[in-house]
Amino acid sequence: MGDPLERLGSETEMESLESTMKEELCMEIDPPFKENVATAEDWRKALGKVVPAVVVLRTTACRAFDTESAGASYATGFVVDKRRGIILTNRHVVKAGPVVAEAMFLNREEIPVYPIYRDPVHDFGFFRYDPAAIQFLNYEEIPLAPEAACVGLEIRVVGNDSGEKVSILAGTLARLDRDAPHYKKDGYNDFNTFYMQSVSCFWHVILLYKRPCHHKAASGTKGGSSGSPVIDWQGRAVALNAGSKSSSASAFFLPLERVVRALEFLQKGRNSYSNKWEAVSIPRGTLQVTFVHKGFDETRRLGLQSDTEQIVRHASPLEETGMLVVDSVVPGGPAYKQLEPGDVLVHVNGEVVTQFLKLETLLDDSVDQKIVLQIERGGTSLTVNLVVQDLHSITPDYFLEVSGAVIHPLSYQQARNFRFHCGLVYVSEPGYMLFRAGVPRHAIIKKFAGEEISQLDELISVLSKLSRGARVPLEYISYTDRHRRKSVLVTVDRHEWYAPPQIYTRDDSSGLWTAKPAIQPESLQLSSAVNHIGQGVTSQTVIPSGEETHAEHVNLVHSLELADGVTSMETSDDHSSEEPHSREESDVGTKKRRVSDLSANGIAVTDCSLSETGEVKSVDSITMESEVSRDYQGAMTVTTNASFAESVIEPTLVMFEVHIPQAIMLDGVHSQHFFGTGVIVYHSQDLGLVAVDRNTVAISASDVMLSFAAFPIEIPGEVVFLHPVHNYALVAYDPSALGAIGFSLVRAAELLPEPALHRGDSVCLVGLNRSLHATSRKSIVTNPYAALNISSADCPRYRATNMEVIELDTDFGSSFSGVLTDEQGRVQAIWGSFSTQLKFGSSTSEDHQFVRGIPVYAVSQVLDKIINGAKGLPLLINGVSRPMPLVRILEVELYPTLLSKARSFALSDHWVQALVKKDPIRRQVLRVKGCLAGSKAENLLEQGDMILAVDKEPVTCFMDLENACQALDKSGDNEGNLKLTIFRQGREIDVIVGTDVRDGNGTTRVINWCGCIVQDSHPAVRALGFLPEEGHGVYVARWCHGSPVHRYGLYALQWIVEINGKPTPDLDAFLNVTKELGHGEFVRVRTVHLNGKPRVLTLKQDLHYWPTWELRFDPNNAVWRRETIRGLDYSVV
């Protein structure tokens, strides 16, 4: 087909088609195309002047704030005032919240820059720098010429490709009246302005840096080019690059008229650069109204009168094609209930206004003054008097940081996105305390602890009255479900996981956000001190009388842009993208689950307490308690079709809900939220103990809540023992917190370690469903001696080793945990959950879980030592100091091999017969898979060794070795050596191997330095069989978004072995070195990866936003305590 214009028969029809085509292009009528007269030499000269003034900006958003998440990124800026040291870039580069940034010039001189202004609405902002710091580069500022922009103008966009090299885009301005691009429905968007659009032709790439480019944007401009100057052939900036369209090779540029105005205010406030920059006020006015530009055809359909259109056309330039129409009005703003969507703006203070620039000029010049708007609404002319509001007054410049959460007044940007009032209490980042309760990002807090919340000060006032461990209701709304309040139960951190609440306030003079305590430190006391037996409840629940509290959990997508602000943390040893991305954990099964998965069965919290010691109860009180007790017991006995074993075991079962703070996700733990079923193994007046698998309670640094099947109450628990080998943990609770009735209903299970289960035995599998009701079924043991073989995960974490587990013919699926009992309800095994990782190919893996039976003999052995007293370190449990048992183990990972296979390795008939005689059922021999690095067995046992005997007694299973280790403790052998007979490469060898003594505390010390979480090498890391010779006591377990380590690439899964050439073999040496480093000092770090690869990198220490702190578990008080090792005194910053 030919061109449509060639098929038209008349000149009139041709003109009509041209008009239609222009209408399809949004009524674009711009000044005539200017003929481009610039030559290649002109462009070469222009670029020669411009390129040296263009800088690479490396920015780190230290906290989530307003529309931005914490993270690190590259961008572009350019010098617009050399004498004063001012760099222009985008608002989303300068950030609305705390930011640390450096500018790198063409010759690789890098200097710090500080934000001095970010526009509340439009996508531009300014950094300042010290011009004297640039010593080796000749450059000139780039002049701003907004008047030079016109359709058809040939342009160049000078940017960088993800900070790697200068890239120059050649293009042509195609439109000057493009609608502002819409980026996100819950993020930053520009509005009330036109944008320019270009059609790009080709890229010129000037290779200035040798490193290759890793990230490219599929658009007209490349990643890292935000803030690039759009220049003409004379070297003048005619626009500012802001965004690009991913579906086509086109970019969007911000006009510079308002940029020039803001720059002039900054220049008037300062003649030259000085160290102390004085904040400059740039007047900005708003009606909290979003306008859109509609063509006259559309305004006529909206009811614009012909006379009005004629007046507007006569008063406007010939190229004007439309008018401003109200698109949205923010509730509570100056124009709320005065203007409506669809209103057509005609006059402002008697002047015809059809362009954004003129409207904004009038508003900026009329802050806190009345203006008169004439509008037409459905053909009716109306006059509206409004007071122009100061735009900066609804732009938050402070925030509250509490338990990792960032909370501040709702900004104009988000109020416009969500259609809420400005200034409401807005959750920019939920952190830990709110995340644990199920409060999502972008939530608006409406009520806290029974008090209405409309301002941040009111929230702080309520927080100041709460004690650590207090549980209070919170109500919030979200923009996704704006018409209903949701109620959750918030638990104030009992442990010192995070710094005390702080208020950060923006200081435009320094470019920093300074912190001060939000509440007095003495306000944060434990909700109840160390309780003695019978002295009340350990947890404090505050629920207003007369109000129904429904703990409804919402679907929470955990954003890992999420800083201690530890808003988010990563375990990866690399970072695939410098831009933050929302991430939702893919929880498999129900063991690792988001808060949203607990919506249907809110657990009631009953405030029950025992009477004070010595208090005499009335007869009525005793009678009432007896009746209530009988009611609960009766309810449990009338369960339909319940087996005897189920009715016996139900009062011993407990549902766990475990949360782990982002700040201390230690030991490679792979989720923040776990839950499962445990069984009470000890219950007395002063101590309760619950056994549960370690896929539910993975580490000791966690908050545990226990819900009892026997009585509707939820109380906290404390992790007291983590078995270093077997897949179980012991969690203590305070029986007095159950109240008298609950204490009488709850009981401990009877453990039956002997006789061991055999193949074909009948057992009863009993556990709890989501409603805390017992569920059971009869099953048959198919394999009581199944040896586990769980491979190491990508990020090493606890995995059960050297264990034989029980397999059944039928169960309830991979998410159901509980116990295995005999017909009398005696517990023979814990039906526990195990975590593993399935790998697909070389780079893809997925977390999975399965359930197996864990014989109770190991639990009963440790339990007896705790109850009867054992040699070990003391631990405060419910106000009583108790010695906790130590476990002697052979730190070797073993696996069984059938004797038929062992014979093929030349094992003698003598040993085959001896092993068969010892254990005719298993018919196996244990082989060495590997020794834990740093263990006493390392370098003595080798991979593939067969362990035949201990002290000449044949060994056939893991329990034989455990019994041999325990025998050493009973005999008082201080050396703890085992005399092993092994078979290695065809030879029988006798070797003396040392054993190691481990406690059940897990990792009890962690350090945060520059945003990386370092700890001692935990067993899962040591199980890989490698530790650096230089030192292995400073292992990077996690890193935080928006931190210096994120900015400079010090990621997880490696050891820090040197700082500035000084060895750091352990945490103490590491602290001694790092606490001497100053703020802003560049540090040389030598690391060794898990794969043994060494690396040297540098990073810049930031003590302002990322002080060095240490978290330790205090066994004398059973509390995790936090100490700041090195930080800044904000009063002198």
Image (tube, rainbow, N blue to C red):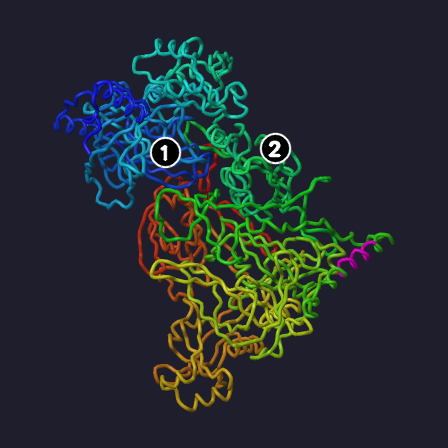
Residue 542 seen in the current view: yes
Q: Amino acid at mark 2?
A: Ile
Q: Residue furthest right?
A: 619
Residue 160 point in image, percent of width and height: 26, 37
Hey, which quadrant is residue 719 in on the image? bottom right
Residue 93 disc label:
1
Q: Earlier in the sequence, mark 1 or mark 2?
A: 1
Is 340 left, or right, of 485 in this rendering? Answer: left
The amino acid type, in three-letter code, at marker 1 is Val
Numbered disc total: 2
What is the secondary structure assignment of the residue under circle 1?
A: helix
The magenta span reads 624-633
Q: Is residue 627 magenta?
A: yes
- 612 is within the stretch colored magenta: no
At 55% from the left edge and 57% from the top edge, which residue is drawn? 700
Residue drawn at x 28%, y 33% as measured from the top left? 250
How many neighbours does mark 2 have within 10 angstroms: few (below 14), some (14-19), or many (20 or more)? Answer: many
Mark 1 burial class by Cα count in 10 Å: few <14, some 14-19, many 20+: many
Up/down of 68 relative to 786, above or below: above
Check disc 2 and report the residue beneath it: 453
